[in-house]
Amino acid sequence: MNKVARGSLLGIEDLDAPEILKILQAARRMNPQKPKPLLRGKRVVLLFYEPSTRTRSSFEIAAKSMGAMTTLVQSSGSSIEKGESLLDTGYTLRAVGADVIVVRHPLAGAPRLMAEHLDIPVVNAGDGMHEHPSQALLDAYTILKHKKTLKGLRVAIVGDIFHSRVARSACHLLSKFGSKVTLCGPAELVPEVAATLAPGVSVTRHIEEALRGADVITLLRVQKERLAGLKLRLEEYVARYQMTAHRLKMAKRDAIVMHPGPIIRGLELTGEVADGPQSVIVEEVHNGVPTRMAILARAAGKVR
Amino acid sequence: MAYERNKPASLLIRGGHVIDPTNRVDAPMDVLLRDGHVAEVAPPNKVRGSAEEKLDARGLIVAPGFIDLHVHLREPGQSYKETIASGTAAAAAGGFTSVCCMPNTTPVIDSQEWVNWVRQPERGAVVNVLPVAAATHASKGAVLTDFRGLQRAGAVAVTDDGKPILDNDIMRECLRLSGELSFPVVQHAEDTRMTEGCPMNDGPTSFRLGLRGWKAAAEASIVDRDVQFAQQMPNARLHVAHLSVADSLKAVRRGKRSRARVTCEVTPHHFTLTDEAAGGYDANAKMNPPLRSAADIESIVVALGDGTVDAIATDHAPHACHEKLVEFERAAFGIIGLETALGLAITKLHREYKIPLTRIVELFTSGPARVFDLRGRGALTRGNHADVTIFDPKKRWTFDVSKSRSLARNSPFDGWQLTGKVVATVVGGRLVYRE
């Protein structure tokens, strides 16, 4: 395997705890209102093979606010549509002068393949069901605004774990800092093997068990079409796993409720919980900008 | 190096240690080959006939020529991946004197014409090429090919390899005919209804990588069904290709115990690597069937030792670089394997798991010869084809894929240090490879 350029961010699994802390500290120093021009003269390419609102706009705002030039390349309306391979697209973007490539791709491992063949940093903005490292970092940033430490924290992640890159990245990150993560959902969405992902990760089918004593509750979107494919009735999922104000009482009184979005009110959570005092869902989106500023500054060699 | 095509009328292989499982020979012997056949095997210096050429085999094992039941030579139609000439050159370097090539070419080898085409001297083969023809037209699984005609044209078996024969009635009909003609049906056991979108084995690694897992049951359920069919038809000849999971072995064992004519092969990569090899999205660790768990390897090793497995076959599957240098899920399945097979067998099976060298030789020679009824091959019996493989079981070497004779470079074993190397390969009395 070829070497990956310094400053690349391919997944949380590859990072050690001190490296993660470095990024989180850099994020804390970022002020989106008065940003430093750390990326002046740099060209950041946002290569998106999948639709995205939050991730794309916050990477773009993060890059531009630090003085970078950005360009968006999407699979439709580019040579990708004509059958150009991922690596050829990468070589092309490198040749036009890209300094950093931020890539979102429906296939797991695509950012790694690019990084292994390009001499510029590649930032994974979500690859298939694999990882979504910037989301895990902004969630850790958000948690640390409300909790003193990640160590010993009890985190419940409820919903479609199997298809979720957010869940995989979150498990790796929280595990590296000694949190206890309980994954909760039906077997089709939360297979037993999920517990092998990292130390301190366990699986339960019972929401009560997951919520009891939880400091953080992360809800994941459940796609109706997936439930249908698994012959799981929507009402049954809602009855067993939906986050309601009543269920929320089972967690610690100061527990926070998180969701990477987009949320579906009335499915994985009620509107009452989404808008309630314990919800930090909007704050997460807000924290995406400073976190991604730190990630891009690191890619440009400005975080040591 | 492929040697000149001259054909010495006689060659004496002197001073070597002969392992010939069929004839229960495991002793220092000289071997005399004459006019393309084995003329004499006798204790050192006791060969009576004379020879024009001599080959010094002191310190080396002299075995019947190795037979590979499962290779993809990619011709006709996919010569950008491999040609019959380049693939057989790699075979010679790996000690294989006969290779059975799969029909999933373009077009599919499903007619006598294409079987003949593959066997023509113009293809430039340096070892024996024994075609396995398609079991159904264009391997579409619907209409049976002309088994009798294909057999007459020189095909040694039928298969839809790369795809399974899924339909119950079609598979039963294939097996019925296989019994009637004594013409083995090779099954690629994969229930494709369970493996769609699955690029690797189901387990912790696939979950971690965010890839859909290929379940063991997708293979074992087909093996199970086929063994049951074979048990219902006393003469049916079922051969299970590249078997990879413990449960498939259970089914094969059950078949063998009931005296059904069921055989199977395993590949070197399935007894060497686990699915963790794909842990960094390395497309050279992507194969069909996928690399499995450590527990599966343990079962395979037991089955290699106890006789459940009949042959080691490489499933040599060359691909062009651009077919592997893509996203893991898009990458082609398969690896090349001819030049590393013996080294892996000795390094892994003999040195690590203590399987005797005689058994390993059997898995490369008399075992595969029996599976496809290859008369006159797989043993150094007088009158047999003069196919001989000479190897050094102790030699340590490093596999460098950039020097492979194959056109392809898709191997996960590049840079591996192996023990056991082929020194010379003789096909029909002619030296086709010499280290």
Image: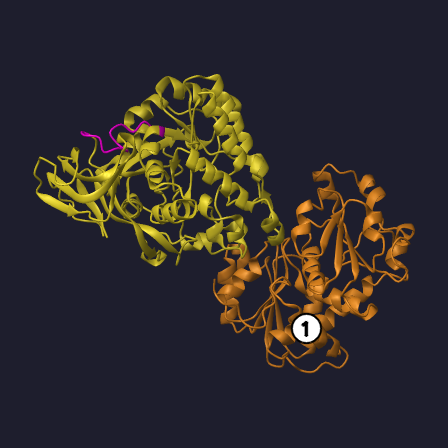
Chain colours: A orange, B yellow
Helix, strand or loop under label 1: helix
Using the image, determine if residue B41 lies above or below residue A81. above
B377 drawn magenta: yes
Residue B29 found in image quarter: top left
Q: Is residue A208 left or right of residue B14?
A: right
Query: Is residue B161 visible in the rendered structure shown here?
Result: no
The vertical placement of B356 against B168, above or below, is: below
Quadrant in which the C terminus of chain A is drawn: bottom right
Q: Is residue A295 visible to the viewer in this orientation of the structure?
A: yes
Magenta stretch prevailing secondary structure: loop
Location of residue B116 (image quadrant): top left
Kindly indicate the quadrant of the structure image that contains residue A259. bottom right
Relative to residue A165, is residue B356 drawn left or right? left
Q: Residue A38: give x, y in percent of width and height.
A: 65, 81
Q: Is residue B67 left or right of residue A225?
A: left
- x and y percentages locating residue B36 in the rendered image: 16, 35
* B6 vs B75, nearest the viewer: B6
* Residue B255 or residue A244, whichever sits in front: B255
Q: Give the total of numbered labels.
A: 1
* Amino acid type, mark 1: Ile
Q: Which region of the structure is painted magenta?
A: B371-383
- Badge 1 crowding class, 10 Å Cα cut-off, few under 14, some 14 to 19, many 20 or more, is many
What's the residue at 91%, 53% (across, down)?
A245
| Residue at (35% x, 21% y) in the render | B182
Residue occupying image coordinates x 36% and y 31%: B133
Residue A11 position, x and y percent, is: 62, 62
Q: Chain of mark 1?
A: A
Say above or below: B41 vs A95. Answer: above
The stretch drawn in magenta includes residue B244 = no
Nearer to me, A81 or B59: B59
Q: Residue under circle 1? A: A23
